[in-house]
Image (cartoon, rainbow, N blue to C red):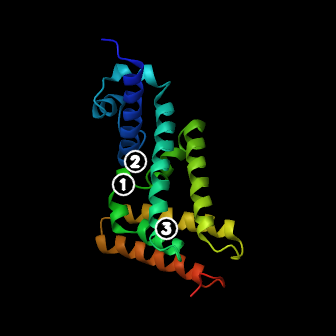
Amino acid sequence: MRVSRTQAEANRERVIDVASRLFRRYGFDGIGLKDLMAAAGLTQGAFYKQFASKEDLAAQATVRGYAGIRERWRQFASQDPRRPLASLVRSYLSPEHRDEQAEGCVMAALGADAARAGPVVRAAMQDGLVAHIDFLEACLPEDEPDRRERAMATAASMIGAIVLARSVNDETLSKEILDASIRDILKRHESTPGPHAK
């Protein structure tokens, strides 16, 4: 039975949404097309009508995942408009975010996979990472020195802490990694003179 153009587009969007979550949970190579399409309620044959390759889908799923995370970052930062970075860092480096890999940070879940992927996926990762750095820079006071460099270092610390916290069995150690990273990031930020420093 032939599906309408509208239904085909809805199916494609559903596949991208499902892939975005499943790739973050299992990795780009950790789930096959058959299982991925089944999770979206479609057959594997439908895949080739919608996407050029699995890498094409991986890139689009990466873009979709970053879009969702950017919205969450805005929500996190808005919890304390006077200190948006502190609010964002505490929310990002939380046990809740650590445990929700399929819905969490794309770079923390898929950064290592992207390093071995093709240029299309790496380009999507790069665009998302740059947008994250831009957001972090905007959370810093305008008169803070080296804002761009500080935003990059903060992004690296946040992402790395989540990767490490997810990689160990010991719940206490995992939480210590998160807490130590929060303290370190905020200490470095608040030690710089500026309107947000305490």
Comparing labels 1 and 3, the label whose residue is closer to the camera = 3
Query: Residue 53 shows which numbered tag?
Result: none
Q: Secondary structure at mark 2?
A: helix
The alpha-carbon separation of the residues under discs 1 and 3 comes to 20 Å
Where residue 60 sits: x, y (%)?
49, 37
Specify which label sits upstream in the sequence, 1 or 2: 2
Q: Is residue 13 above or below residue 26?
A: above
Q: Quadrant of the C terminus?
A: bottom right
- Left or right of residue 126: residue 14: left
Amino acid type indicated by mark 1 = Gln
Q: Residue at x 58, y 65 (%)?
A: 136
Amino acid type indicated by mark 3 = Ala
Q: Residue at x 46, y 40 (%)?
A: 61
Where residue 53 sits: x, y (%)?
48, 26
Q: Which residue is mark 2?
A: 24
Q: Secondary structure at mark 1?
A: helix
Q: Which residue is mark 3?
A: 77
Please say if the residues under marks 1 and 2 sit with CB atoms less than 8 Å apart: yes
Residue located farthest toward the bottom when viewing the structure as drawn: 198
Q: Is residue 191 above or below residue 166?
A: below
Q: Secondary structure at mark 3?
A: helix
Specify which label sits upstream in the sequence, 1 or 3: 3
